[in-house]
Image (spheres, grey):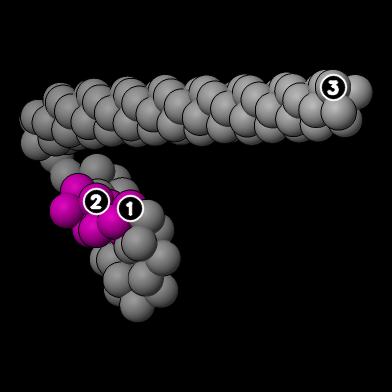
Amino acid sequence: MAALLWSLYGVLRDQVPVITINAACVAFQVAYLALYLRYATTPQRVSSHSQIIIIIIIVIIIVILIVIFIIIVIVIVIVIVIFIINIIIIIIVIVIVLVVVVVVIVIVIVIVAVFIVLAAIIVR
């Protein structure tokens, strides 16, 4: 079982030597179990079968918990990314609004200045 977990670790970390060595160990363990179950006496086989079933159930539970953990982490990352994207969009909108307000203020100032100049020309 330890070799199987190390193989899984090697796959997750993309470590070929860890995968290779532990996959060979898993193969030897499976061969050993097959030979043991083939040549063991009946009482020993019954005891071994129950232990193997318990180990398989434990491994399945561990795998399910790991998958649930990975799903939770992925959902949290997605929520954080969406939150960050929303903040960026809000900041962009605020900047655009501020630029538009500044442009409008400049246009109003120019128009007022033109009217003041025209008024000064007409009054003369």
Q: Amino acid at mark 1?
A: Leu
Between 65 and 22, which is closer to the camera in this rendering? 65
Which corner quadrant of the image does residue 23 belong to?
A: bottom left
Q: Which residue is mark 2?
A: 5
Is the residue 65 above or below the residue 33 in the image?
Answer: above
Say which residue appears at 41% left-offset and 65% top-offset: 14
Q: Which residue is mark 1?
A: 8
Q: CA distance from mark 3 to mark 1?
A: 90 Å
Q: Which residue is mark 3?
A: 123
Between 94 and 37, which is closer to the camera in this rendering? 94
Badge 2, how many Cα within 10 Å: few under 14, some, many 20+? Answer: some
Task: Name the dominant secondary structure of the magenta segment.
Answer: helix
Can residue 118 be seen here? The reply is no
Q: Decide if residue 35 is on the left or right side of residue 80.
A: left
Between 80 and 121, which is closer to the camera in this rendering? 121
Q: Secondary structure at mark 2?
A: helix
Badge 3, how many Cα within 10 Å: few under 14, some, many 20+? Answer: few
Image marks 1 and 2: residues in contact by CB distance under 8 Å: yes
Between 73 and 66, which is closer to the camera in this rendering? 73
Q: Decide if residue 104 is on the left or right side of residue 7.
A: right
Which segment did they paint magenta? 1-9
Percent coordinates x, y for residue 36 in the rendering: 21, 50
Say which residue appears at 74% left-offset and 30% top-offset: 113
Q: Decide if residue 45 is on the left or right side of residue 34.
A: left
